[in-house]
Each structure stands twice: as C-alpha cells, then as structure tokens.
Image: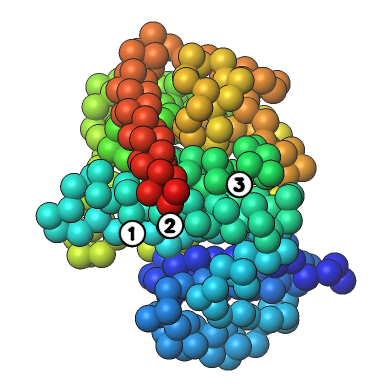
Amino acid sequence: MAEPIRVLVTGAAGQIAYSLLYSIAKGDVFGKDQPIILVLLDIPPMLPVLDGVVMELQDCALPLLREVIPTDKVEVGFKDLDAAILVGSMPRKEGMERKDLLKANVAIFKTQGAALDKYAKKTVKVLVVGNPANTNCLIASKSAPSIPKENFSCLTRLDHNRASSQVAMRCGVSSDNVKNVIIWGNHSSTQYPDVHHAKVNVHGSEMAAYDAIKDDAWLRGDFISTVQLRGAAVIKARKLSSAMSAAKAICDHMRDIWFGTKEGEFISMGVYAGGNSYGIPEDLIYSFPVQIKVSLFVQSAAGNEGVTTSMFVSAVLENPVHRVWNRSRLLLLTLVCLVNRVR
C-alpha cells in the first residue's frame, strides 16, 4: 500500500469540515488505496470541539485513516503537507463592512500562505474555500512565493454543481447526464453560470443544453439568478450556510485535482488567470473552465477543448471581472498597509 499523505483541513471544528472529513478519511477523495494522515487546524477556543471530532473519526474505524492530528499551531498544521483545504475564514458579522471583512481575512490567509511557504511541500495542492474565496486564494498564493501559482485554486465547484443540477432537473435526467457547464468569475452573486458549451444526455442521445431545454428565456433568466443566489436561499431556509453540498463540492474539486478530469470534459474552479485567452486581467484568481491531467492544471482554452465565449457571455462577464479586479486592488492596498504596520 502507498505511503500516507498529509491532508490539512482548516476550520476543522466547523460545519463544512464536519460534513467533509468522513469522505476524505474513507477514500472518496484521494483514492480507495491511499492512506491518510488528517491534520485538523482551528483556533484555540475550538480545540475541545476538535477533540470530539477526533473521537468520532477514530470511532468510524476507517482502515485508510492512519492518524488524526488536531492543532492550533501553524508549524504543526502545515508541516509536510500534500494537500491543504483552507475552509476556515472570518465570517461577515452584522454591521461589518466588506473592507473590514477583507482586512480580517487578509491577516488569516497571509499567515496561512506564509506557513505553506515555510512548512509544506512545494508540490502541495491548495484549495481555498473560506469566503471571499477568490480573494483569500490570491492572498495565500502571494504569501507563498516558493509554491507555484498553479497549485492554488478556490472553490467554485459548488456553483458548478448547482448549475448542473438545475439543468438536469429541467431536462428530467440525473445530474451525471450533464457535463461542461461553466462558472465564470467570482464565487459570489456576480458569478456567471454559462451553459453554451454544456451537453445533456437525454435517453442516450447527447445534445446541447439549449436544444435539450428549449427555453432560452429560462436559461438567460431564472437559471442564472437561481444559481447566483442559491447560497442566500439556503441560508434563508436553513438559517445556516451550505455545508453538506459544500463538502461534496470540495470532494469533487480535490478528486479532479488528484486524478484529473474525464476525457472531453471540463469543470469550473477559481485558478490564477495568468496566460488566459479570455481577456481577464492576469493578476487575479478567477473561475474558468478547466481540464486537469495528472494533478496539473490545464485551462481548457490552452488544451484540446478550446472554449470560446459568445457575445452574450462576453458582455455579461464584464461585471464579475470588474468586481474581482476592484476587490483585488483593495486587497493589495490592505497588504501594503499590513506590511507597513509590521515595520
């Protein structure tokens, strides 16, 4: 059997991690023959809760789970990592302005990026989940200059799965009969769900999503707004943010990083925009259609699939580009302020 890999989950006492850890530990993400050392990082007040999580993982009696390490110390949490799933972030509280939230998360992800740079393997694959995910991923990447930018990604797979599910329900098929939807831009309500390249298998016949659905008004209206606002709808109904579906999306995302995407298919994830062919500013983390081969990011525009954008999509993309770009400019100003304060 293979040597164990070290997998870090931050915010490990939270509800997303609680839905996530079992799937990782039993082999749903990194393979059915891959032993796992799970490292659980959270803030000091949450350590008693982590002890309970550790007990539950032990009580699952999972053969692939070799060790569980709960900690609040970055030098322990980030040591020799093969994969890092950064779930924990500062939540937005009542009365808090976006710039205040950004400042708090800059400090968190700057520290974690520096810890990755100092302690983790240079081949570590990093997935940022904590919101604002695109911005936090950029912070972590900039704070870990010795780790390739291509090793960092942020989660838009939840939005991707939501889009696939909406198309599947509209067509009366299961979600595995839908492929190649795209989420462009930011993991927020400014994202753009795009089905211009999506395919649907209906009764054994594969066709374009527009042909399968036959309702352009829905695809350009309610479909888009439903996906964009789904997170808010879950919070309104559940009084808590998405956890089970977020954990499933994390598993899907990391599995594709580890084993690659299926031939002829692409998925959505936030990746470094350098070298993209869509006119997106390069110094951003932006959600693109992505193909992956042997744990290597390959944007589909540079691969065999060659994704183009329609005039309608290109026009709509202006909004998320500007939103991500403006947030990133604020991020850089905040980073400069923090550096000057340290000096």
Instruction: Please name the residue shown 18% across and 47% down the image.
Output: 97
Q: Which of marks 1 and 3 is in front?
A: 3
Left or right of 63: which side holds 190? left
In terms of sequence position, does the residue under pointer 2 or pointer 3 come before the other? 2
Left or right of 63: which side holds 28? left
Given the image, on which type of amino acid does mark 3 rest? Ala
Residue 136 on image: x %, y %: 44, 46
User: Would you place residue 284 above or below residue 155 in this image?
Assistant: above
**Cβ atoms under marks 1 and 3 closer than 8 Å:** no
Left or right of 34: which side holds 192? left
Q: Mark 2 points at which residue?
A: 108
Instruction: Please name the residue shown 40% across and 22% down the image.
Output: 210
Q: Mark 1 points at which residue?
A: 90
Q: Which label belongs to residue 144? A: 3
Instruction: Please name the residue shown 37% across and 81% down the image.
Output: 45
- The answer to whether residue 230 of the structure is visible from this angle is yes
- Please state, as top left, top right, bottom left or bottom right, where the N terminus lies in the image: bottom right
